[in-house]
Amino acid sequence: MISIAKSYELCARICAASGSNFIAAFRFLPQRERRAMEAIYAFMRTADDLADSDAPLLSRERALQEFQTFFELALKSMMEGDDAEYLSAQEMIFPALLEVIQQYRIPPQYFFDVLDGVRMDLVPNVFQTAEDLEAYAYRVASAVGLICLHVWGVPPEELLPNAQTPIFRAAAACGKALQWTNILRDIREDAKNGRYYLPLNELKLEVLDEDPVKETAAESVSTELMELTEQVRKRILAGDTDFLYPAIQKNLQRAERFYQEASLLSSSIPVPGRRVFQIMTGVYYRIFLKIRRDPAKIFQKRIKLSKMEKIFLYFRILFG
């Protein structure tokens, strides 16, 4: 059985190998919180890697289900006070992660929500309405944020699943704001990968061959929506994007509303977790502002912050 210390070391190596810019922000946390964030990140990264591998779809589905089953068994052993045996490399992150879950009283449901979101991305998704996309964004982004807030010092009772506390609502909105920013930034890149995430019923219908909100037989809805998504994707790749701008503007407004709803969150997080939160959300919000200023640029290049912009942001948060 792998020791907890070795498990934390493995999580740290997974973080270091990821190349993520946000890993550097963990350095501003005390050691205990930093190690907790590394264990959480290792879980998310492992799930993503299993889903994004080059293996056939069935193999990826099976690998992700096995990972979830191992996680369920590990949780069961923890609750019953038993020692579990961890054999695979993926399982070896669990001793550290389980300690984090116990120490910070994190509801395991949030990890299962994340796995549900990862599973949704195994195949190209179709989102007919904004509500559909919000449900997806909650799983892949809001749930992650709710997990992190436990580590950053927000009282667990404020973050219970489906709580109606102001902090929970702000956290859910924050995750959606970040995910919407990702989606808007990556429209062209997603089209190359066979995906289109914005709500189909918000497209300018008169320029499409099909009406995505018309009444159809239940068994044909999915097929028609997939065909419509493919039509949209091909037009994006052909450079025919003018029809998208009304939908882009509507979703920029939606993202702005999510950012506003999330605004109270920062003051609710104790320092130094607040700094990490401000760095992570600050990067995304500045990307959002760039997209809002000139939406056409998302079809020309990947929108990002320059090194100097990141340095200025870090300096302002740490010393401002």
Image (spheres, grey):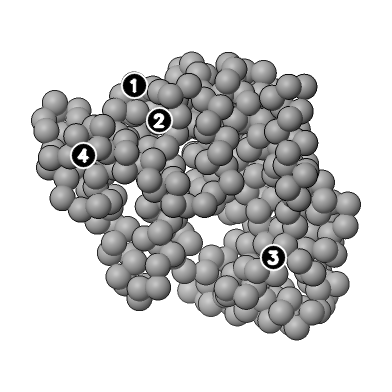
98 lies left or right of 155: left
Q: Is residue 107 above or below residue 216?
A: above
Which image quadrant is residue 197 in?
bottom right
Where is residue 174 shown, x and y percent of the image?
64, 36
Q: Which of the numbered marks, if any, corresponds to residue 55?
A: none
- The number of numbered discs placed on residues in the rendered structure image is 4
Where is residue 255 shown, x and y percent of the image?
73, 45
79 lies left or right of 46: left
**Disc 3 on helix, strand or loop?**
helix
Which image quadrant is residue 213 in?
bottom right
Q: What residue sits right under mark 2 in the picture? A: 36
Viewer-side label of 3, 1: 1
Q: Earlier in the sequence, mark 1 or mark 4?
A: 4
Viewer-side label of 2, 1: 2
Q: Earlier in the sequence, mark 3 or mark 4?
A: 4
Q: What residue sits right under mark 4 in the picture? A: 74
Q: What residue sits right under mark 1 in the picture? A: 103
Q: Which residue is nearer to you in this view: 241 or 218?
A: 241
Please identify the quadrant where the N terminus is shown.
top left
What residue type is disc 4 on? Answer: Ala
